[in-house]
Image (cartoon, rainbow, N blue to C red):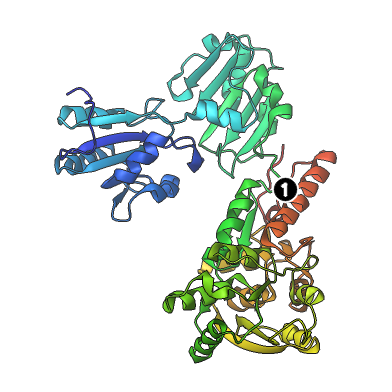
Amino acid sequence: MSPANHSTQTRSGFVAFVGAGPGDENLLTLRGADLLGRADVVVLDRQAYGALLRHCREDAEVVDISADAAENSVSLKTIQAAKAGRTVVRLCSGDPSFFSSVTDEVAACAKADVDFEIVPGVPPATAVLTYAGIPPAASVPEFRIVDAAQVDDWAKHAACEGTLVIYNGVADAVPISKALIAGGKPDSTPVAVTSDGTTTEQYTVVSTLGRLGPDLKHAGMTEPALVVVGDAVGMRDRLSWFETKSLFGWRVLVPRTKEQSKGLSEQLRSYGAVPEEVPTISVEPPRTPQQMDRAIKGLVTGRYEWVAFTSANAVKAVREKFEEYGLDARAFAGLKVAAVGEATSRALVEFGVKPDLMPTGEQSSEGLLAEWPPYDSMLDPINRVLLPRADIATETLVAGLTQLGWECDDVTAYRTVRAAPPPAPIREAIKGGGFDAVLFTSSSTVRNLVGIAGKPHNVTVIAVIGPQTAKTAEEFGLRVDVMADKPSASALAAALADYGAKMRHAAVSAGEVPRRPSQMRRGARRRVK
């Protein structure tokens, strides 16, 4: 049966062979993401493409073929599911029509009279070169792609006048280079070998056909990889953008709660890092809610002149209490509201409340006190401040406000509880130097991470959000390498990126291959040019 122009909305079964792209999960096509979102069954190598399951429904059945890659078995699973009236997505490496092994699976669907669609993916032949800073077909008369497994005579490919891209050739890269030279290619012809292209494990060795053997000797190159031959390789020095990111490939530990770390992790990814979120703190309601109940009642009935928020979690706790009582941001009418910093201010604005007071300098309790006006009985009809905070908050703000003439209702709005220890591999990576950096966003993240997982290895870069966090880190025997110029998570990530950029620049200036901190520990695998 020929491929049908089939709508997946119909009752009959359907199989979509979707190109997963070259490795970077963000290079999936819109059509591929749409089909994954509607799939009843997804067949894939989970180890390679598991990240793409974020596009799927929660109830989608996942068939992992990483341990069972037999074509007949895969074909049978997809055909049986489609025959049962289900929509099946078979994720394929790269582009299904590009040196793909799924041709027989497609033929099996056709033979079984099952409707199917083939969705192109971004092929490694262009994507990996672009990510390596090599223009695939810039100012060359020819762009040739070959599968090394199917080439018996390299002499005809030695005549290629443009860019020659070789799939499945990394194991035989040196014999191939010698064969191309024997076929008439100058031994000075530039060549690049890139492994794990478009991922944060990408690594490129640049050489010439004549020197490829010694240059690859200690590089540890494995498939998936591409060998690129031609003058376009020479443009890499000017066009490389991916591997030169300031934190490229850095494994960065983010010890925060899941909801807090989302924006920070996205920012780290933009610098080329691989963030791993390890919750160290669990935020829970207070053991006795009556104190918060009285505070909310007092807020509504005019007991307070000010409400001071020292964290986004405090805003969330008050907001949840408001919702419980059927209140909204209008209950703040007539009140003055203070926020300790940017993150707290954003949480308030999302709630519909614009802060009246924020520190112009240091975003901390001390910074807030520096801006806080003293109580004036002529100007302030009420002298009371509501301070909804964590159960472990320091007394700095209360003491400072009291000195300024204010009375404080210091109310426990939420509890911070130490999270459960992370899995053993994470603990081992923390203590063994498997992480390149750790970001500490508060003193409690330092205490809790050390408590549940142990001290980070001494090669790991320690980055802290401010002086108080630095002091706590040093009390635990940690060397502080990076401090944010202002106490915000965004500024902390930017400071780490600047540190990484300086490390990279120093290595390049010294004629060395840039290495991540984790690669500097004893016994770490080292790649050389």
**Tag 1, which secondary structure?**
loop
- Which residue is painted at 65% across and 50% down in the image? 525
Q: Is residue 7 left or right of residue 390?
A: left
**Which quadrant would residue 209 be assigned to in this image?**
top right
**Which quadrant would residue 389 be assigned to in this image?**
bottom right
- Which residue is painted at 65% across and 24% down in the image? 191
The percent coordinates of residue 226 (x first, y second) are: 55, 29
Q: Is residue 288 left or right of residue 140?
A: left
State the residue in front, 377 or 32: 377
Tell me if residue 391 comes above or below residue 319 in the rendering: below
Q: Is residue 210 left or right of residue 428?
A: right
Q: Quadrant of the C terminus?
A: top right
Q: Is residue 169 visible?
A: no
- Give the residue furthest to the front: 378
Query: Pointer 1: what residue?
Result: 515
Packing grade of label 1 (10 A; few <14, some 14-19, many >=20) is some
Q: Is residue 48 visible?
A: yes
The percent coordinates of residue 304 (x first, y second) are: 63, 84
Q: Amino acid at mark 1?
A: Arg
State the residue in front, 65 or 442: 442
- Which residue is painted at 79% across and 41% down in the image? 512
- Which residue is painted at 30% across and 40% down in the image? 89
State the residue in front, 393 or 222: 393
